Amino acid sequence: MTSRIELNPLVDLGEEQIEGLYGRATLSPAGPIIAGSWGTWQLRYTAGSYGIDENGTLLVAWRFASDWGKPQTSDSSAPNYVSARTDSRSCRVAPRWDPKGYIRPWRSCLAIDIFDGALLPGETITITYGDRSGGSIGTRAQTFVEKAFCFRTLIDAQGSGQYVTLPSGPWAEIVAGEAERLVAIVPSEAQIGRAFNLVVKAEDGWGNPASSYAGTIVLQEKSGSISNLPDRYTFQPADRGVRRIGNCTVNRPGIFTIRARSLDGTLAGKSNPLRALSTPGSQRPFWADLHGQSGETVGTNSVRDYFAFARDYGALDVSGHQANDFQITAQVWKEIKAATNDANQPGRFVAFVGYEWSGTTAGGGDRNVYFLGGQGELLRSSHAQISDLSDLATDRYPVSDLHEALAGRKDLFIIPHVGGRPSDLAYHSAALEPLVEVYSSWGEFEWMLRESIERGYHVGVVAGSDGHKGRPGSSYPGASTFGVYGGLTCILASELTRSAIGEALKARRCYATSGQRIIVRACCESRPIGSQFRLDRPPVFDLEIVGTAELEQVELWRGNELLQSWPAIQKRRPDQLRLSWKGARVRGRARMARWDGTLAVAGGRILAVEGYAFDSPAEGVQAWTPNSVNWRSITTGDSDGILVTLEAQADTNLAVDTPFVSTEISWSALGEGSKRLAAGGLDLELTIERRPIGLKERHFSASFRPADSPAGENAYWIRVLQADGAKAWTSPWYVTH
């Protein structure tokens, strides 16, 4: 591949001088662009005095995080068709898509090659994204909002493989679409008589705050136990799609949910459960998204925008900003620390100073470093994208060198995570790494916990987004790159300060979810999640779970052994089929598994179909008839599926076809069990089963003592599965018998 080196000798020239030499580009229509909308946009480039020589190239690059529809040049009738033409009579042009065409974060490139002559000064190239002339429906715009989405235009005028960026951009603002749902967020726990906040958001179909929403909503808690809850609220322009309603109080113990609906009946939503207590315990639940990036490196918008979203839109208590270290210049590190410290407000919002040590897989893979104070030393894995090498001696690679450099430090902690690079758990510091990340927008990584237990490590679990779209706490996956909705961590701490939250995390007093604010109150021998102790008999577990939807199954694991499941025997619906699939191709960056497939029914009839655990509007059921269903789906460790209501006989035949596995089975042969087919990769699996009934309630409690307790140390942990596919995982208790 030709090297992509951006020339920088023009820094002393003005914009007009650069454009005079290399040209300029404009975009039509110029915006604003509605997130996720289908349309046609033209980028028009006019050559400068250099022109573009034969074998030269025009590049138009997007940031890595963007999920704008991937341009294709082969089928003019299909979505995302792109064309390029020139008014030049002295050359020809040809477009091609290059997903690694330029320097991170500007990786995704449309390249326009110049051949059979040169583009002369003043001649133009017009690129049409979403060219509809051949019947295409257009191209889908990026699905998330951005203040200045840039079509970064670069010119290799001499055909040397070296590029100059045009200062003209061009760029356009990406704005939210119309509201399609309401989201309500309350604390997971509140003391009777003490005020709490309710946050209500209007979101578009892609999860952006619908900033133009001006409707009236109705708020209701059916038991009437919440005071100062307004009956109605009309959104104002200053709200920008989100409203924080303060001074609400609950007047009796119990579990409460607030429902919101628009006055015209078109929008609805309900809050996460709120547990009201007469006397709160010493540890309260706080919700965190500990992991994401902004536009200073590979993400979107600024670091200050990032923390403002986490606090005001994500309704988080805790957040961290973890930029890739090999992109953090000294100036960017200074700004990250300043913005983080400005955002940190003890008692209201905790922001951790930190960064992502982004070493290559061979050097240990990704780790997130968090400091408990307002400062922190940046020990990078490399200077891969930093031209100033004056502090090169501070680099620490491999990760064992980082562990050695930070040994004995009490003012920080490290969390291995799986992003583009999976952590290699062969590298481990027991003193510095108390946790592993089992879920993020990249996918589900329960294997991190299981492997850690097998290796004898004492670790807890967290989940976050690793969001690149500037939406911590509300990180929807969009249409590409990221597989799932971003996770959340519930931290059980004495107060909302850096020191108390840090102490709880280092003590493993936390649990992870797939992004839902599921309440998990659990103890082992009256000890909290994450405890380590000795016992001369089998331990007693006391559990209370409150889901955001009906609970399907609650499981107690001992290491990698399923010890107890509630319900013990799963009853199933006689007229419904659940077809689900899960897993990832590999642990690394190419983990995404595409499960686009079909179900064919012979000798029976399909009455209804709905999606199960699909992650974005880009996935889901595409069409169905009385005898067939087809869908689009990707998994990155998680599960997706369909729920099918059937009119079936004993000999009704079910035929499933997917890229990974295909099978047939009769309705009678399926019985009350399930058919599971392994499909290779990393836990790739297809499951055909009659739909589980589950626990049928959102609230579950139990007390349980195992029949035995093997000698030595045992790691006990809980996994919760909701009927909608959402999950929670607790940090283990480490009990030595």
Image (tube, helix red, strand yellow):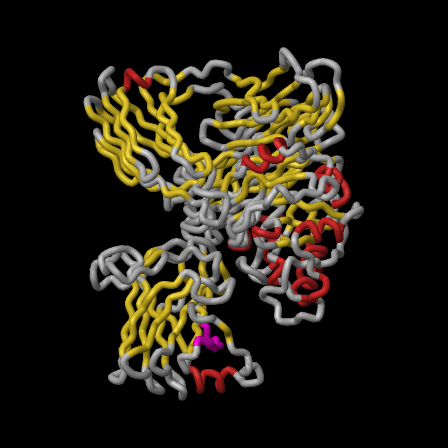
- Image position, residue 234 (x, y; %): 50, 45
Name above or below for residue 343 compared with residue 230.
below
> On the rendered structure, is 669 left or right of 313?
left
- Image position, residue 197 (x, y; %): 63, 39
Q: Is residue 612 visible?
A: no
- Image position, residue 507 (x, y; %): 73, 35
Name above or below for residue 256 compared with residue 15.
above
Point out the stretch of residues depicted in magenta.
161-169
447 drawn magenta: no
Residue at 65% x, 71% y is 388
- Quadrant for residue 624, please give it: top left
Q: Point out the residue furthest to the top here.
A: 707
- Quadrant for residue 73, please give it: bottom left
Q: Is residue 88 visible?
A: yes
**Which quarter of the rendering shows the N terminus?**
bottom left
**Which quarter of the rendering shows the C terminus?**
top right
163 drawn magenta: yes
> On the rendered structure, is 415 left or right of 32?
right
Name above or below for residue 196 compared with residue 390.
above
Residue at 30% x, 32% y is 662
> On the rendered structure, is 481 left or right of 462?
left
